[in-house]
Amino acid sequence: MERERIDSFIQQHKEEAVLLLQELGKIPAPSHQEDRRAAFCKKWFEEKGCREVWIDEAKNVICAFNCDQYEDMVVLMAHTDVVFDDREELPLRRQDNILMAPGIGDDTANLVNLMMGAAFLAEHQDQLATGIMVVANSCEEGLGNLKGCREIFNQYGNRIRAFYSFDGYMSMCTSIPVGSHRYRIQVLARGGHSYQDFGRDNAIHIAAQIIDALYRISPPKASVTTYNVGKINGGTTVNSIAQEAVILYEYRSGSETCLQEMKESFCAVIEKFRAQGKRVNVEILGIRPGAGDIDRQAFQRWTAKNIACIREFYDGELDQAPNSTDANIPLSRGIPANTIGTVKGGGAHTREEWVDLNSIPGGMGIVLRILELYMN
């Protein structure tokens, strides 16, 4: 009976989903600037008969179903922001069943499938066995630093018993988070003329020494742990001793313990140079937590149920590799969470990203089948 209900809904709404994707995909939404998409989503939810819809202070669009009737709730989330800084309408074009636009797959198509899930819930709200919160969230990308998801857990964390992030492509089912700490390291020096003031501290030279020291850190072995200097800039011209240099640095791991070990090593490097009288300032750009304590066997059983739902609509090879997504927040708190892709496509984080519109019905089916797990 459940599958018949799902198939009927998909058949009735698959063209609507494609039109929604084409409309939503044009709306610019840089992290922290998702206002236009948020307003669009709120209006759409209300037109579909969702009774409790609001936009919170973090620019999350929240659609609640029976959350006032149950103490516990399940959160399903897809993010509105894209990695591009466009403020004007995003360029979108369609070629047969391929739709191309910046951010169209990450995460607009997944958001559309979740929005269709909310429309499904609006028709069957009386059959829910728990509270459900559907969230079109802000600030998942880059230096958005998971702001939208953090706000949801700040407000409702003690009530959330399960979490889904719909993100990535259809082969993806992630249960292992990749946490990260990101820093901006500023080195300052007196500077001067390259000939007359030769011998003074050069900020670029000091920055190079800091980078060398950072790359001599031996990462923890308990979980795969990496580090990277992604950008360095500084100085003014070839015949000036540099007064400033700036480094962007991060380290990543699936383990919160390993992240903390890396933090200690990083701080030790910085303090070493400060003790030598070097002027080094550190700014935290973003922190994404790794995994916290969780009942692994119960978590694996829960994930297996979700994989079974995916398998009803996708028969390809599943990618269960670690990833950095909104699910980092619940997993760091020991709350079961999966990140699941619902669309076929490619080119994520490029302006040529594309999705296969033929995959939209299957992706919608994955979302609806998961929702069925929480219905009578």
Image (cartoon, grey):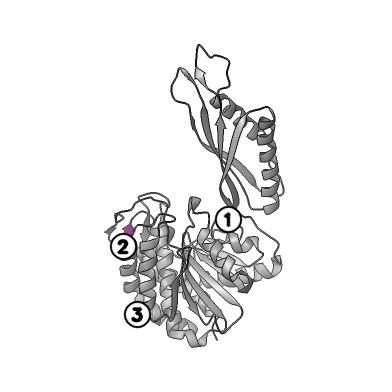
| Residue 289 seen in the current view | yes
Q: Label 2 amino acid?
A: Asn
Residue 198 percent location from the top left of the image: 55, 14
The C terminus lies in quadrant: bottom right
Q: Earlier in the sequence, mark 1 or mark 2?
A: 2
Q: What number is the disc on residue 238?
A: none
Residue 197 percent location from the top left of the image: 53, 14
Using a 10 Å C-alpha cutoff, classify the residue at mark 2 as few (fewer than 14 neighbours), some (14 to 19) or many (20 or more).
few
Gap between marks 3 and 2 measured at Cα: 19 Å
Q: Which residue is mark 2?
A: 97
Gap between marks 1 and 2 measured at Cα: 29 Å
Tags 1 and 2 touching, CB below 8 Å: no
Residue 360 percent location from the top left of the image: 39, 68
Gap between marks 1 and 3 measured at Cα: 34 Å
- The residue under the point 38% across, 62% down is 35
Considering only vertical position in the picture, is 77 above or below 371? above
Q: What number is the disc on residue 321?
A: 1
Q: Secondary structure at mark 3?
A: helix
> Per the image, is 241 magenta?
no
- The residue under the point 42% across, 50% down is 349
Task: Give, as a single range, the part of the protein colored magenta.
Answer: 96-101
Q: Which residue is mark 3?
A: 12
| Residue 6 seen in the current view | no
Q: Name the side, left or right, on which 238 lies relative to 280.
A: left
